[in-house]
Image (cartoon, rainbow, N blue to C red):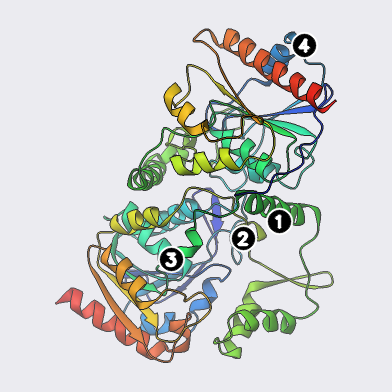
Amino acid sequence: MSASRQVNAVTSRSRLLLVSDIVVGIDPAMWADALRRAGWGGPVEAHIHPGRQGDVALPGGNHEPLDPAFALGGTDAIGEAVVVVGFGRSGPVAQLAGLGGRAAAVAVVDGLGGPFVEPAEQIAATLDMMRATMADEASHSLPAPSEVDRRLGHGLTPHRDRPTAERMIEAMPVPMLVVETADSPLDASTVDELTSSADRGRLTVTRVGRSTPDRVATEVADALVTWVSDLGRREL
Amino acid sequence: MVEMNRTQLRLWEWGAIGAPPILLVHGAFDHGRMWDGFAPALADRGFRVVAPDLRGHGDSGRLASGHVWSSCATDLGFLARDLGGDVGIIGHSFGGGQAMFVSAAWPELVRWVVVLDGLGPPPEVFDEDIDLVEVATKSFDALDRIRRRPPRAYPTRDEMADRRAAVNSRLPRAWVDHLVLHGAAAVDGGFVWKSDALFNVGFPGSFGVAHLRAEFEAVTCPVLAVTGAVHDTWSELTPEQIDERLSWLASSTHRVVDGAGHYVHVEQPAATLAAIDEFLAGLEG
């Protein structure tokens, strides 16, 4: 198993980096507001995967689930002083940042991967995505800046391999918060099983109820701020 | 250059337009000029032969990610469609895996596949006990190097050839020089590899032997696998492992070429062509 890494100081001034789900996207203004209302006074940044919110060109033209890890790697957006928060399909991106020494702590919101499938189903899904891309003539060229990229609807998934999800949790060397909402692809018992072997000194699991998006954001922001604040107190 | 699947692909062509098409797919870090010795012989047999530089290689479009397996295969699917379908695909190494994946995605476009030492890495590469911290750290370190430093410039192409020859020691020097000539770009201070450095970066994921098997089992067209008899860099499968992987295919033929290692079509082109001739004759029979 992986060697432990020194937990870096997390303070009330730590930077939070929100990494959007590559398909669904996030509203950074809504999240910044929710975090402020939850009492967060530190800086908040957001990485928005191109194609959903139209403001960034898409290099290479295609989407891969770990694109945000490639986009953030080699930049100052991530680093040992940053708390990286991965939403949905970008949960594994946040986990990789933690595993790879590019985060002081990580949080995943419905971001442990899944729903888990057998390898043959995973390969079949990839082949289906490729066929959908070729069949969708309107997606063959890049979208206009104001358009949602049609390729995001062709079936992109995060890792869907349960052993990989388990290993990533178990190997995590920095504090990790798992936030599960009603939109999670995993049921509660699966999350419990996945996290059962993790170091409970590092791992925190929180669930928020079914509600409106604004209300969910408030509850998730409360959970994030409470967790980060607690980490800060532990470091002090 | 053609615009395709949101990228640019450099294509190299031999033979007559309208002749039955063959796609030639090079391996990792190579390019379409890899086929300069092999493609004319196929064209002489009455085929239209098209060899792209895969995205991230040669003169083709650059990458945003090192995870390009499905993107490259989709590019090839677009090419196969634009060639009118009913294509044969010959792929070397990484390109062999790509050839089979394209045939799995679009069996209606691919008539047959020849895989030149491209049955995938050895099982130990998929070791589930890898240190995720180490692998993720190395991947981010690699992105740091790529983004924060200029690419390494070699003073001369000869030095690049020396480096390549040290890795692929069985490749004839003339071929190493040829691959470097077309695989290097001039910059201030010397030359850099044309292949996109991002291609070499991969984050730990969920791909394992079971996934490789599922890919192979999705292939329905006839496959000829050609391997060299000589152990070589990137030819690490044992005969038993090769047999096992071929058993995952619906229809496969295997030919072992004496006196060849990983670059079987470069080291023994006549024997490789003979194996392909026999395979194609069998399909027609």
Closer to us: A226 or A122: A226
The answer to whether marks 4 and 2 mark residues whose Cβ atoms lie closer than 8 Å is no
Do the residues marked 4 and 1 share a common chain? no
Residue type, label 2:
Asn
Residue type, label 4:
Gly
Report which residue position mark 3 lands on: B120
Secondary structure category for the residue under label 2? helix
Report which residue position mark 2 lands on: B200
Report which residue position mark 1 lands on: B142
Q: Mark 2 lies on which chain?
A: B
Q: Which chain carries label 4?
A: A
Crowding around mark 3 (Cα neighbors within 10 Å: few <14, some 14 to 19, many 20+) is: some
Disc 3 from disc 1: Cα separation? 24 Å
x then y, percent, for residue A147: 56, 28
Asked which quadrant contains residue B213, the reply is bottom left
Q: Can residue B45 be seen in this view?
A: no
The quarter in which the N terminus of chain B is drawn is bottom right
Tell me the number on the disc at residue A39: 4
Do the residues marked 1 and 2 share a common chain? yes
Disc 4 from disc 2: Cα separation? 43 Å
Secondary structure category for the residue under label 3? loop
B168 relative to A100 in the view: left or right: left
Residue type, label 3:
Gly
Q: Which of marks 2 and 3 is nearer the N terminus?
A: 3
